[in-house]
Amino acid sequence: MSLSKQQLAKSRVLVVGDAMLDRYWHGAVERISPEAPVPVVKVTREEERIGAAANVAYNVITLGAQASFLGVVGDDEPGHRLEALLRETGIATHLKRDPGLKTTVKLRVIGRHQQLLRMDFENEPDHEALALQNETFALLAPKHDAVLFSDYGKGGLAHIGTMIAAARAGRKSVLVDPKGSDYSRYSGATVITPNRAELQQVVGSWRDTDELRAKAQNLREALKLDALLVTLGEDGMTLFDAQGDSHVEAQAREVFDVTGAGDTVIATLAALVGAGMGLRDAMPLANKAGGIVVGKFGTATVSYEELFS
């Protein structure tokens, strides 16, 4: 099943989750430090990209759909930089500022096209900022076709249960990229998209496909989900729903960087579902998008032309 550019352009996705700024310092490595056995990187180029849940919204936009982003940031330089980047990309931006919060920054030092070091700057938002986020969510959700929660475990989705219930009461499709071992907070969503390791954290390991099927369907029913989409890396992905399960193989291509592949998969799924496509039809396209993005460096995105070519 295909969608025209016009159909996809009408799809409105509200992305809620942990905002993050990805910074890259690129440089040349020509010697080892005399102070310690570490490489010396002479930084020649700095780069900034939208990260985490904000990158999911960016993926929705580059596909050609409409995206709004709701998140909490600090009243600091990275927070203002992230807001500027979001606005430049055409994302309708609704950021709540928490003066006590450090906007999450992941700084990666790259030498000879390899990541040498990553430094994380972060802490958790306070409840006042999160309460403001709830109020804005109640106003925004009715204006969108699909609601996507991207959980990076940074505390920005403390009230996710309330928001899922409100969105479902408004008959919206709700998609969740989960985190952690307690999935009860995602109860009632349309679909959640754990990867293999994330699902094992919740249901334990499985010996074969039959055992995976039983565990996935039990979890789906316990959480009252329409579907559970498990991404299995090089083994593709499987959608478990009331009709049974549907599997697609991974798109064979050179894997350059898996950063953000999960973001692309769920963003594609949300944009297509928002345009009226069913999950079973949308899944192979989301799988294709994930295959395209792992062939690119860093947190990357996919265009309409790449997806439907």
Image (cartoon, grey):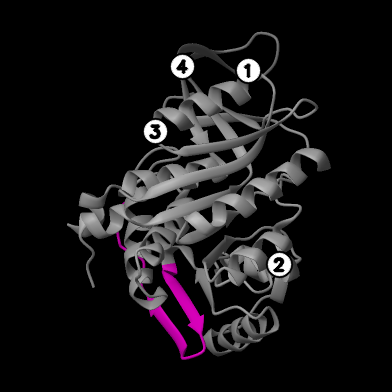
Looking at marks 4 and 3 on the same chain, the residue that comes earlier in the sequence is marked by 4
The Cα atoms of the two marked residues, 4 and 2, are separated by 37 Å
Dot 1: element: helix
Give, as a three-letter code, the residue at label 1: Glu
> Mark 1 and mark 2: span between their CA atoms?
36 Å
Q: Name the residue under label 1.
A: 77
- The C terminus: image quadrant: bottom left
Residue shown at 77%/25% (left/top)?
99
**To which residue does mark 2 refer?**
201
Instruction: Tell me the amino acid under the disc marked 2.
Output: Gln
Along the line of sight, the residue nearer the viewer: 77 or 307: 77
- Whole-angstrom CA distance, mark 1 to mark 4, is 23 Å
Q: Is residue 265 above or below residue 170?
A: above
Q: Give the range drawn in magenta.
A: 235-254
- Residue neighbourhood size for the residue with mark 3, other residues' Cα within 10 Å, grouped as few (<14), some (14–19), many (≥20): few
Mark nearest the camera among 1 and 2 is 1
